Amino acid sequence: MSEAIKPSGELSVEGQTRRAAIASLLMGAAAIAAWRLTPTQRMASLHGEMNLESMIPKQFGEWQVDLTVTGGVVNPQQEELLKQLYSQILSRTYINRVGQRVMLSIAYGNDQRDGLQLHYPEVCYPAQGFRLAANSKVELKLAGATIPARRLETVFGNQRYEPVTYWTVIGETAVLGGIDKKLAEMRYGFRDLIPDGLLFRVSSIDRDTNAAFALQDQFSNALLQAIPEGVRGRFAGVDHIA
């Protein structure tokens, strides 16, 4: 029988002291780990100021902003909530030379810790009354980048068929969301970094889903190529740039 344990099963003074010391060490280690895993440096400050209005060109290739269109881009949250979630939101409708339109929405948040998360279209569209008919994962090859993305097929009242393509960038990494997003946040946290986040979304009104997605890819590729190379990675994920 150990000398540190009395026959009654109670710890001796020596045993109690040893247990208290171990508990103190464990609590100290936990406190240090918690402190170390609480990042303090914002990636937004390292990247430099994000200005969506100036970074995203209003005209590129065969596309230009359609000034005749007002509204149309789905942003279901109330303005006050949008201000809490995002630092900046850019919503535009572009038109090409043959009259095809693509709606662009980019939401940027400079702090992607819990409670300040991006809201995803598969949640936003149903909140606006749309029916989510399909949700699939894809890998897009755009402007020298491989971008993990999602395709949605949404319908409003059997009249507005709006296929959607979107992806998210956390810090410098394009992710699909969910566990991938949390893992990216943790990796940055170990480096004492608070990641910023961006959601890039394009959609178009079209009953022909395949044609809509092809048009959205063409638009997104042209747009990314038109963005200066020095900041392009912030919209596509630096880790995925060839």
Image (cartoon, rainbow, N blue to C red):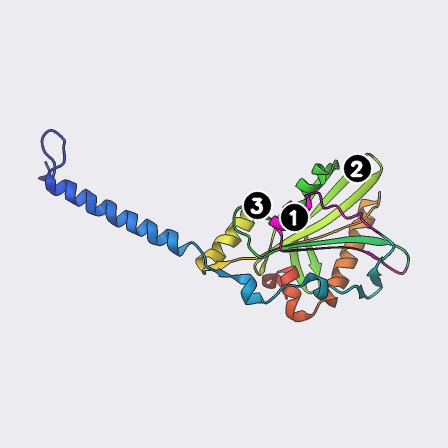
Q: For the residue marked with disc 3, what is the amino acid?
A: Gly
Indicate which label's residue lies in the foreground, 3 or 1: 1
Q: Residue 57 location in percent, x, y?
A: 76, 65
**Image quadrant in which the C terminus is located:** bottom right
In the rendered view, tell whether residue 74 sits above or below residue 10: below
Q: To which residue does mark 2 refer?
A: 156
Give residue 25's mark: none
Q: Is residue 22 left or right of residue 222?
A: left
Which marked residue is nearer to the observer: mark 3 or mark 2?
2
In what quadrant of the picture does the N terminus appear? top left
Task: Please provide percent x and percent y for residue 102.
Answer: 81, 53
Determine which residue is flagged by label 1: 82
The stretch of residues the image draws in magenta is 70-97
Q: How many marks?
A: 3
Residue at x-position 83% and y-position 62%? 64
Q: How crowded is mark 2: few (under 14 residues within 10 Å), some or many (20 or more)?
A: some
From mark 3 to mark 2, how far is it between C-alphas? Answer: 26 Å
CA separation in Å, label 1 and label 2: 23 Å
Q: Percent from the top left, x then y, of residue 174? A: 61, 56
Distance from the alpha carbon under mark 3 to that under mark 1: 21 Å
Q: What residue type is labelled 2?
A: Phe
